[in-house]
């Protein structure tokens, strides 16, 4: 959906914030011209200065620094990079050093300004990488953000600060249940949102009824069509494979922009 | 006890469909749904809930406005920009790290536990099930996943059940890491698409990072048989076990709409393939040698 909207928008900035599994580049094949590591600051203890007072351990809420025997040990993959330990240390024995958790790459695909992030495998926290991708947001034109699935911190980080959130669902009990949870997140974040039904067939009534009950605009339906799945499987964006689909994406984009500018739900 | 975890790179590849069918085919098993921000397994297995509890995870800084001197030290040190110019804390931004508390000269800041979710234990036709639901926009899904797995194990032991089937979340971040640790086998469900292939490589790297044996199942293989062959080739080179592939079949969506496991909905092409995958996986879990590359 995000890539399709960027394609029909023409001039747009696309930020792929699904940093656990970034996929937009597979369809857009952008020319990536810049690459920078994403780091968080983690503590390094100067054993000469450390008096084993444990203040750092008491300050750390993530069990990332501990005194064991006559040493203070750091567990970098647990560290959230808050700097609390260094602030708590009375001996100035903690220095913070950058640790790489992922990478951000940017470039162009035709008229689309493209940025994506990639979390290093084995790293638990996606949010620093998402923040680094969003730091590239220039706001000169329409910005489309592709977010991870779910309702947890990666989604919150991706959606934060947006004018509007498009929720993509499927007309199944799974889709409806997950949509309900996503809408709760948007309500909590006070971000206006609307719904697109993907793989739509006869039998969307439950989703339509839910949208009506929540006063959510239904911004479009993408039909259930094996040709769409096959185009996707070839690595071709379905708007290129099915011309009528391009018009549907244009309609969704237009209605979404109307809603976003009208500030209505 | 043996634990099989089903994961995938992206959502919607068919994890829950496959896992629910495995439960029906196993007959008697314990179940854990670790997809705590999209817990859908219960929509197919309909557990009767017999226990429910709040999950407290993570913390939130709270500033006592009476004590606050408005010195601004907390705002200077907060790396998550969670403290407003009026010295209140924005819950969506607060990481719960307590750096603000370390520097506050007036002891105006305290950390309070957040209720980040709810977990449930229930009984399905096939055995006990534990699942959880993250509250909207909460953190600490990894800890909640660890709790779900632990409670499922406890219940399985109580009931004398030797098998635990765990439905994992998508991605490779903290909830997936919490789902994988010490599992006996991870079945990675993927699709024959460029994104499926890309996500599969990352999921396999994660399994190898945490030393969990992995097997791969290609779902909807006939959408692109060429890429399916490539995935099999890639797995053969990396010495990763591959199950029989599952075809694209509209019965899958219909079974979800009916709220039943696919193998109980019909005996169509996808249903039969999932049953074949189950036989391969259960043999692997039992310690038999992998027969390998999905004899179709």
Image: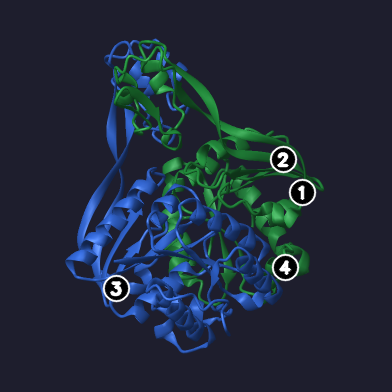
Mark 2 crowdedness (10 Å alpha carbons): few <14, some 14-19, many ≥20: many
Mark 2 or 3, closer to the camera = 3
**Distance in Å between CA atoms under marks 4 and 3:** 38 Å
**Distance in Å between CA atoms under marks 4 and 1:** 17 Å
In terms of depth relative to the viewer, which is nearer, B204 or A252?
A: B204
Residue A44 in view in this figure: yes
Give me the residue at 62% from left, 38% from top: A133
What residue is disc 4 on?
A: A234
Q: Are marks 4 and 3 on the same chain?
A: no
Say if A33 sits above or below A94 in the image. Answer: below
Q: Secondary structure at mark 3?
A: loop
**Distance in Å between CA atoms under marks 1 and 3:** 47 Å
Say if B202 sits above or below A114 in the image. Answer: below
Q: Which chain is green?
A: A
Mark 3 crowdedness (10 Å alpha carbons): few <14, some 14-19, many ≥20: many
Which chain is home to disc 2?
A: A
Snapshot quadrant of residue A262 = top right
Query: What colouring does the structure picture have?
Result: by chain
Circle number at residue B29: 3
Which shade is chain B?
Answer: blue
């Amino acid at each position: 959906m995000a890539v399709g909207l960027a394609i029909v928008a023409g001039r747009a900035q696309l930020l792929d914030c699904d940093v656990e599994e970034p996929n937009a580049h597979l369809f857009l094949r952008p020319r990536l011209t810049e690459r920078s590591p994403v780091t968080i600051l983690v503590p390094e203890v100067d054993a000469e200065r450390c008096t084993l007072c444990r203040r750092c351990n008491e300050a750390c809420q993530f069990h990332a620094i501990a005194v064991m025997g006559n040493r203070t040990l750091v567990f970098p993959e647990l560290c959230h990079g808050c700097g609390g330990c260094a602030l708590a240390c009375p001996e100035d024995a903690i220095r913070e050093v950058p640790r790489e958790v992922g990478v951000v790459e940017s470039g162009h695909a035709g008229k689309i300004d493209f940025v994506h992030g990639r979390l290093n495998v084995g790293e638990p926290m996606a949010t620093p990488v998402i923040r680094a991708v969003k730091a590239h947001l220039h706001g000169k034109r329409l910005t489309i953000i592709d977010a991870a699935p779910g309702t947890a911190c990666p989604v919150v980080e991706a959606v934060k600060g947006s004018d509007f959130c498009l929720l993509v669902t499927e007309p199944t009990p799974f889709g409806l249940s997950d949509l309900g949870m996503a809408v709760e997140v948007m309500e909590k974040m006070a971000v206006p949102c609307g719904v697109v039904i993907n793989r739509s067939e006869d039998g969307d009534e439950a989703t339509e009824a839910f949208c009506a009950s929540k006063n959510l605009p239904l911004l479009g339906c993408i039909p259930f069509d094996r040709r769409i799945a096959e185009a996707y499987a070839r690595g071709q964006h379905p708007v290129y494979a099915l011309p009528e689909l391009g018009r549907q994406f244009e309609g969704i984009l237009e209605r979404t922009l109307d809603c976003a500018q009208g500030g209505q739900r | 006890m043996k634990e099989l975890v089903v994961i995938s790179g992206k959502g919607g590849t068919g994890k829950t469909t496959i896992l629910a069918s495995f439960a029906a085919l196993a007959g008697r098993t314990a179940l854990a749904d670790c997809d705590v921000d999209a817990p859908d397994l219960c929509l197919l297995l309909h557990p009767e809930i017999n226990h429910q509890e709040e999950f407290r995870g993570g913390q939130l800084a709270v500033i006592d406005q009476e004590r606050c001197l408005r010195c601004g030290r907390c705002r200077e040190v907060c790396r998550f920009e969670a403290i407003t110019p009026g010295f209140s804390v924005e819950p969506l931004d607060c990481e719960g790290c307590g750096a603000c508390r370390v520097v506050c000269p007036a002891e105006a800041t305290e950390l309070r536990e957040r209720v980040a979710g709810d977990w449930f234990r229930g009984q399905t036709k096939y055995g006990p099930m534990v699942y959880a639901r993250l509250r909207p926009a909460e953190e600490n899904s990894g800890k909640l996943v660890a709790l779900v797995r632990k409670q499922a194990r406890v219940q399985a032991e109580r009931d004398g059940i030797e098998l635990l089937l765990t439905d994992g979340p998508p991605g490779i971040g903290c909830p997936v890491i919490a789902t994988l640790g010490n599992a006996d086998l991870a079945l990675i469900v993927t699709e024959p698409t460029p994104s499926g292939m890309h996500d599969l490589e990352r999921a396999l790297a994660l399994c190898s990072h945490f030393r969990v044996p992995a097997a791969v199942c290609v779902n909807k293989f006939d959408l692109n048989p060429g890429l399916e062959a490539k995935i099999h080739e890639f797995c053969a080179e990396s010495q990763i076990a591959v199950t029989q592939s599952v075809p694209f079949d509209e019965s899958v969506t219909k079974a979800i709409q009916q709220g039943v496991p696919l193998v109980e909905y019909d005996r169509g092409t996808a249903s039969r393939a999932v049953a074949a995958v189950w036989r391969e996986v259960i043999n692997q879990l039992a310690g038999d040698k992998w027969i390998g590359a999905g004899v179709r």
